[in-house]
Image (cartoon, rainbow, N blue to C red):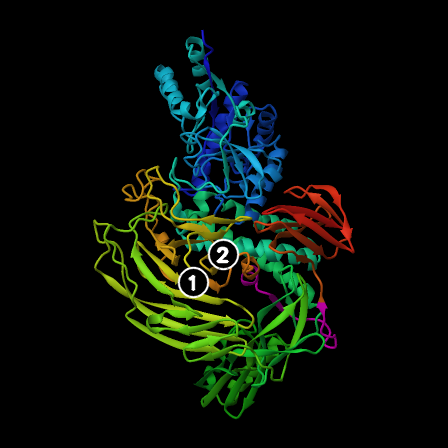
Amino acid sequence: MTEPRLVHVVPHTHWDREWYFPFQRFRMTLVDLVDRLLDLMEADPRYVFTLDGQLATVDDYLEIRPENEPRIKALVEAGQLAIGPWQILVDEYLVSGESIVRNLELGLRRAEELGGAMRIGYLPDMFGHVAQMPQLLRRAGIDRAVVWRGVPAAIDHHAFRWSGLDGSEIVAEYLVGGYGAGAYLFDDPEALGAAVEQLAATLQPFFDGDELLAMVGTDHKLPMTDLVHQIEQLNGRETRFQLRLATLGDYLSRANGDGNMPHWRGELRSGARANLLMGVTSARIDLKAACARAERLLERYAEPLQALHGDRWPGEFIELAWRRVIDNSAHDSICGCSADAVSEQVLVRFAEAEQIAAELVRRAAASVGQGVPDGAFAILNPSPEARFDLVELDVAAAGEQLALELPGGELVAAQEVHRREPLLAEDTIIGAEIGPWVGRRLHGRELFGLWLNGVAVDGRELTLEVGDEAQPVDAVVLAGEITAAADIAPDEQWRIRIVAAPRSRVVARVLVPPLGWTSVRLTASHVEGAVRGEERRISNGLVDVILEEGGTFRIGEISGIGRLVDGGDCGDSYNHAPPAEDELVDRPASVSVELTAAGPVRGELTIVRTYRWPLGLAPGSTARGAETADVRVTTRLELREGEPFVRVRIAFDNPAADHRLRFHVPLPLPAPSSFAEGQFGVVERSGAPEGGWGEVPLATYPARGFVDAGGLAVLLDHVTEYEVLDERELALTVLRSTGLISRSANPYRDDPAGPEIAIPAAQCRGPWSFGFALYPHDGSWADADVPRWAEHYHHPFVTTVGTGAPDLPLSTGAGLRLDGRGVVLSSLRRRHEGLELRVVCLQAEASTATIAGPFSEAREADLHGQAGDSLPLTAGELRLELGPWEIRTVVLGG
């Protein structure tokens, strides 16, 4: 007789923390689930459960039932309950690589507090997998992963070898049929044998003679109360199969695997075996923009500037901000494929993280400002290399001759971009009304956002003198002077004026040391700058921009840039679907242009185009409706001194629903493939992704930091959807409006991806703004040093006023320097009594990173900062030999 086929039954739930219901509503069901689960497992030690690989399920429960933490810990330690390693099941493409690291860090730490983590990269429902995930897991001490969406047709076995860009390799388990393949296996106890046979037949082509895996669970599924009993009953009568209850970790510890497993390198982004739901990149772009702002402020401003220039490390606030960001990183949160109430909460969490990070940046800068003379400015550089950037300063109004003085006396060109005139308001009233008139406008001493510092009377004219700072004046005295003026001639006409000292905003290009600071002051002098502006042209000596007819523009030899194409969308938040006979709007009804800044430091051209957009789909149809509205789209083109790229900002008020707007850029050269920067890597893509699972595969892809094709790089403000059209044109999605979570009859997807629930806020009506930069170049993206210019674009300098003694000299201060071709900074923070530094070799060739700064010793570290072997220093500097695409973490001390 043959041995029965062993089937590992893994009970689990897939817990979407928030989705078509908001978080708190789902949490009530989660509490019910865990309450039941704890009772079941304590009553029968044979009952095991895998709690979805994310600690959020535990933490959300314990916030309501804190008394049950010892029960959970005991079950984890006994091996019945599997938790971790993630804090949240992250959408890998829509957040930064550093967010993924911090997510895993929090999850592993919390799991250890509760008895130990399941050391498996559990990735059951991510909408594809990023190319560097194998390296991330490896460097966190994890060598197995579990995946579903994105697995290509070339993988014909349940276990395969998966390599990152750097060559790091893990063994991945493909969930054949998804994480719910066995969800309903035990629904009918009388038909259990037949159900197991049917499941085995589905799994067999991928398992050959290997032991089978049955994932018994699905979205928000409660644990079954009779599961152990049903398994015992079947095992007692069945000779073909033997069912074994297991956690996912138990199964993988026994799972077959040998050198003959198929192999895959890089990202998993195929629709061959499951729909990829690629439209989430462009759904609710406001969420993606908010995410990028919060992540960037935390990763590259708050943490490094506090680590190097702050007084006390604000670890509690840093972690609070990161938790808000990580709470948002789940696919149903950041993807924008949830109820409007969920997206509202997501935006609030990002706003909280941004507020914390911004205040920490302000405090670090203020600390530096204490060493800068009053009347001057401190300028901080968040980049690990010395570089120039344009800064904007608010100063007392000066004459036409403007320059900035640097330490050592050097002068650089400055340009006034705005002036506040002295007279802010005036009125004519009778004297008796002076008190009420002022009272309606005065809040304490605050008036028009400024401080009331003085009162002057000249005949029948009352002047209220306001300033940017509160002078040491008694508010009671000021109020008395206003009352006394009114008493002079209560029945006569008075002229009342509110006057402030004139002020200007000026811009200038300044050099600042790496992760350090410098100080500057405004002076009256004339220095030539490189930017020139004419009626329809701006130039900075590196780039020429010329306006064309119809509102497009030319950069060098690239003509026709900026064509805006608006088309219909009868899809949903998961998948864009154009109407069968789409009405594309790409010609403006009118165009106007204006030179809005002419140099010498910054030049700007403003294009205003009016389009007539359909307001939505026709009732009862997927075609666009007949009703239209005129929409003014403003495009600002900016050149700055020393930058080889053009900054672009598009703004409009969106009145329309169910449409997609894209910005088109002709490419200098044919582009058979594109290169997109994402999470610790740059991936090459060509054509549409592999399809096959009831979803039309579109060649729209996500890029985070930049996308490069055909000799042109686009530097991106946030994760953006792009497409290369016919190898000659790049299209960026500026806005996609949709009104349903999932459309049951989506023409571009066979199966619903969720419930058909209206999400009117996802139409993104109202004011809209979208920014990026265009960088034409010779050679490849690596030859053109695109990551360096992306670093420059993404990280403007920080400015603050000097608060030190007026006689202090202008000076500079050092931070930490990082050199190396293709080497970029990912993270710098205070940790374990030292500085934890993470760098990435962002290229396909090895490189050497040289690090210099306030340290005298260095040690290797794992992904989460646990120090290892000592590293030698040479002349006080650390040299790291980095392999292609290598992520490296070190701890600096002393």
| Residue at numbered disc 2 | 706
Q: Is residue 686 magenta?
A: no
Along the line of sight, which residue is nearer the eye, 651 or 142?
Answer: 142
- Magenta segment includes 795: yes
Question: How much space separates mark 1 and mark 2, taking CA atoms?
Answer: 17 Å
Question: Which mark identifies residue 390?
Answer: none
Q: Quadrant of residue 667?
A: bottom left
Percent position of residue 836, x then y: 68, 49
Q: Residue at x 51, y 23 (%)?
A: 39
Task: Residue 738 in the image: state x and y as whole percent.
Answer: 33, 51
User: Mark 1 Cα within 10 Å, few/some/many (few <14, many 20+)?
Assistant: some
Q: Which of marks 2 and 1 precedes in the sequence?
A: 1
The residue stretch that appears in magenta: 791-812
**Where residue 194 sits: x, y (%)?**
35, 17
Number of the front mark, 1 or 2 = 1
Query: Extreme bottom residue here?
Result: 459
The residue furthest top is 1
**Nearer-the-camera pick, 12 or 680:** 680
Q: Amino acid at mark 1?
A: Pro
At a point 60% along the width and 65% down the height, the residue shown is 797
Give residue 136's position: percent from left, percent from top. Answer: 58, 41
123 relative position to 722: left or right: right
User: SS for tag 1?
Assistant: loop
Mark 2, residues whose alpha carbon is within 10 Å: few (<14), some, or many (≥20)?
many
User: Mark 1 sits on what residue?
Assistant: 668
In what element is the residue under mark 2?
A: strand
**Frontmost residue, 610 versus 24:** 610
Observer able to see residue 189: no
**Which of 871 and 126 lies nearest the eye of the viewer?**
871
Kind of residue sitting beneath label 2:
Phe
What quarter of the picture does the N terminus occupy?
top left
In the image, taking residue 880 as reference, residue 262 lies left or right, namely left
